Amino acid sequence: MAKKRLSKQQEFEIMKLVLDKFLWLGTAILGIGMYKVIVNDIENSLGLFIAGVVVLIIFVVLLVREYEITQ
């Protein structure tokens, strides 16, 4: 069975959807961490901040790896 090839536009649309999810997930985790800081639960909020930062770093790595940055 032959595999179907995607066009560059289709690849771009799929990657855009995936990267959008990483961005929203990282932002949500950082938001939950900020909420916990506000309600004085500092022990758990540090872990959430680190998790949010890791997700956003993965987001940046995927962006840099997939798309050539032009000057």
Image (tube, rainbow, N blue to C red):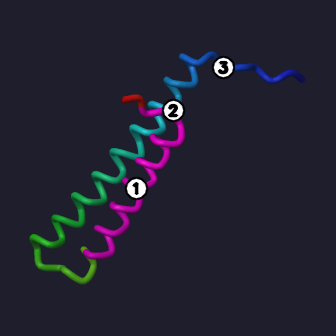
| Residue 29 at x, y percent in the picture | 30, 59
- Determine the secondary structure under disc 1: helix
Point out the stretch of residues depicted in magenta.
46-69
Residue at position x 24%, y 83% in the image = 43
Q: Amino acid at mark 2?
A: Met
Q: Is residue 42 left or right of residue 24?
A: left
23 lies above or below 42: above
Res. 15 mark: 2
Instruction: Give, as a three-letter code, the residue at label 3.
Output: Leu
Q: Are marks 2 and 1 in contact (CB under 8 Å)?
A: no
Against 68, residue 8 (above or below) is above
Q: Are marks 2 and 3 in contact (CB under 8 Å)?
A: no
Real-space CA distance between mark 2 and mark 3, rounded to the nearest whole angstrom: 12 Å
For disc 1, the neighbor class at 10 Å (few under 14, some 14 to 19, many from 20) is some
Residue at numbered disc 1: 57
Q: Quadrant of residue 54?
A: bottom left
- 5 sits left or right of 9 in the view: right
Query: In the rendered structure, which disc, 2 or 3, sits on the residue that comes first in sequence?
Result: 3
SS at mark 3 in the image: loop
In this figure, which residue is indicated by the disc labeled 3?
6
Which dot, 2 or 1, sits closer to the camera? Answer: 1
